[in-house]
Image: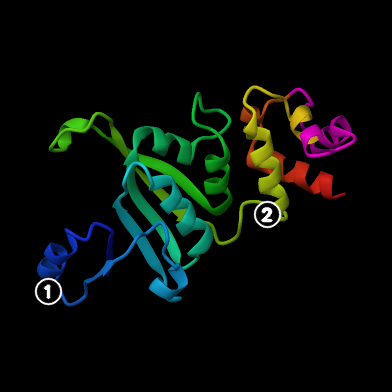
Amino acid sequence: MLAIEFDRALVPALRSVATAHAAIEVLAADATKADWSSVLGDRPWIACGNLPYNVGTAIVLSLLEDAPMVRRLVVMVQREVAARLVATPAAREGYGPTSLRVAYHADAAILRPVPAAVFWPRPSVASAVVRMERRAHPAVDVDQARLWRVVDEAFGQRRKTMRGALRRLGCLDPDGVLVQAGVAPTARPEEVDLAAFARIARALDG
């Protein structure tokens, strides 16, 4: 078991507690900058933790994208962050690039809400526990760089249509590409799922 702690003031206390458990190693490091292959090697891992609200998304995406040895993530994050991690086009809020990147790598679900009342001192926000099970293969077969270029451009300007996003990418026939991909040219990014974004990226490649 490996415990990663950024707060240097807490590391000595953690190491003191861990001395009674030979299987626990405490690593003083910043999880947002970790070289996961060096830290974790190639054996399978389960990542779990109460992630800091301001960097929770960055740590989750780093593990999903750069740490294939992590097969499952179980994390507590701010409720709004949890909603983004698991959102689909059917969600009322939160669906966007983060949701799509998580769905590309993993099957994600909220396990339970965590009210602010269970913490001391009590925070001003609620939390939730999210589980992400890594897929054996990415959810769609498409060039990643092209896929995320389309996704990021589409969500870069909210309330704009997919037609406009493809025009901004330099596509000369956005309606043709979208019809080929089975997406209405007037559709907004919030209505387009991962499979459809992948079809758009492939159609652009063609």
> Which residue does the image show at 28% across and 30% down from the upper left?
125
Q: Place residue 136 in its image quadrant.
A: bottom right
Disc 1 secondary structure class: loop
Q: Which amino acid, mark 2?
A: Gln
> Which residue does the image show at 35% across and 60% down from the upper left?
30
Percent of width and height locating residue 52:
31, 46
Residue that carries the numbered disc 1 in the rendered image:
19
Q: Is residue 184 magenta?
A: yes
Q: Place residue 141 in its image quadrant.
A: bottom right
Residue that carries the numbered disc 2 in the rendered image:
144
Disc 2 secondary structure class: helix
Looking at the rendering, the stretch of residues picked out in magenta corresponds to 167-186
Q: Earlier in the sequence, mark 1 or mark 2?
A: 1
Q: Is residue 193 magenta?
A: no
- 23 to 113, vertically: above or below: below
Q: Residue at the front extreme? A: 8
Q: CA distance from mark 1 to mark 2?
A: 43 Å
- 166 to 139, vertically: above or below: above
Q: Place residue 17 in its image quadrant.
A: bottom left
> On the rendered image, what quadrant is the N terminus found in?
bottom left
Percent of width and height locating residue 191:
64, 28
Q: Nearer the viewer, residue 90 or 40?
A: 40
User: Is 204 left or right of 86, judged from the image as shown?
Assistant: right
> Which residue does the image show at 17% across and 77% down from the upper left?
22
Percent of width and height locating residue 202:
79, 48
Q: Which amino acid, mark 1?
A: Thr
Please, which colouring scheme is shown?
Answer: rainbow
User: Is 49 left or right of 187, judged from the image as shown?
Assistant: left
Q: Which mark, by number, is residue 9?
A: none
